[in-house]
Image (cartoon, helix red, strand yellow):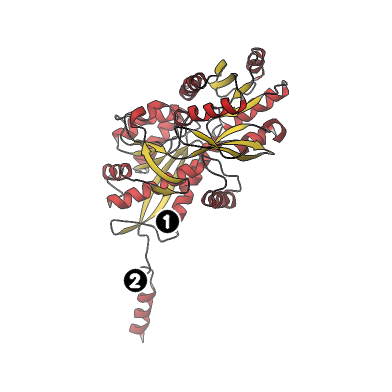
Amino acid sequence: MKKSLLLSALLLAPGLVPGVSQAQETLKVGALVTLSGAGAAWGQAMLYAAELAADDVNAKGGLEVGGKRYKVQIIPYDDKYQSNDAVTAANRLISDDKVKYIIGPTGSAPALAVAPLTEREKVITMTLGFTAKALSPEKPFSFRPNLTTEETSYPSIEWMVKEYKLKKVGALFPNDESGQQISRDLEKAYEKAGSQMSSKEFFERQRVDMVPLLTRMLASGIDAIELDGNSPATAGLIVRQARELGFKGRIVRNGGPATPEIVAVAGKPATEGMLVGSLTDPDSKAVSDYAQRYQDKYKKKMNGFSPAFYDATHMLFAAMQSAGTVADSDKVRTALEQLKDYPGIQGKLNWGGKARYGIDHQVEAPFFISEVKDGQEVIRARCSVKVCETINR
């Protein structure tokens, strides 16, 4: 009788019944992202992406790699969009938490600050930093899963200048690595497209009163304001204050998805007709399903950067499975580089960028130009890194 009960208990134990798997080990993945301050919407989008990807594999009993199953644990740290905080957090993730994989950092300055440490320790990072310096042959463990101004600016600007007759554009940029890089990219793109960025202003990221800068800019006779390079909250302030000063021209945002946040700060009337770069197709079922999951779990509208980092986290998992290891980041890096036509929710994804960065660690993905109507994005053009084509007027 006792032997029979013992046998029944053993057979019913998780992992002992045929077909039932048990996650016996933990795979720690760091999320070094901005969770407070002006860039929080982006950092949260990255963190939530990693968590949702982890939910996917954990719901199936864990990530199977090399004959073992791992429960994925996402460990978040807030870098506050500051280099010093990013380095402190990276040290903790690597030394204390023993991670070999990091989603982040969020911005250019933090990305450059942590790179010497993560590269030395062979920690793979999936950065949002827009600076061209974030990727290079000297940084073989750094990847960028989102498109940047370098990839999207010229085809987008060429299309907008032609369609909306933009001639003189003004722009405000944060006075840091991200702002300086984006201003150079945009200035070249507008000039090449037959327009000009005739007025530029730089400011410290903590600034909230843009009226003096905007007043000077509007006095120069601009017909459009470019928002690229600004955090969602700051971009919303610029739009609101520009409209309060009486600016009637076009508002443009070529990069850094932030439409819901800008609308929330500036209001629907102020953002009506705003042209924005969209990294995902809102008509895509895969993206809309993901956006609904995001909304259901976090009670927030999905930020447009999130699908890129959701796909990136799954690509990282796929590379581990292909390499047959979670411990050897060298092998995982090689497997990640070799992924071709990865079927993400954004579409087929590949790594490129060697001509620009010296290494194929920049994702290549489709993107779109949308017009904001009643607070919502309506797609006007479908783009590749070469050209944008009108699909809806």
Quick one: SS at disc 1? helix
Q: Amino acid at mark 1?
A: Val
Where residue 123 appears, as percent x and y from the top left, is: 33, 39
Pick out the residue farthest to the bottom.
Answer: 1
> Dot 1, crowdedness within 10 Å: few (<14), some or many (≥20)?
some
Residue found at x 54% / y 22%: 173
Reply above or below: 48 against 71.
Answer: above
C-alpha span from label 1 to label 2: 20 Å
Residue receiving disc 2: 16
Residue receiving disc 1: 57
Where residue 46 appears, as percent x and y from the top left, is: 48, 41
Q: On the picture, is 333 further left or further right than 173? A: left
Reply above or below: 120 against 248.
Answer: below
Where residue 13 appears, as percent x and y from the top left, is: 38, 71
- Classify the position of the N terminus by image quarter: bottom left
Report the disc number at residue 369: none
Q: Amino acid at mark 2?
A: Leu
Quadrant of residue 102 within the rendered picture: top left
Quick one: SS at disc 2? loop
Q: Which sits in the foreground, 220 or 157? A: 157
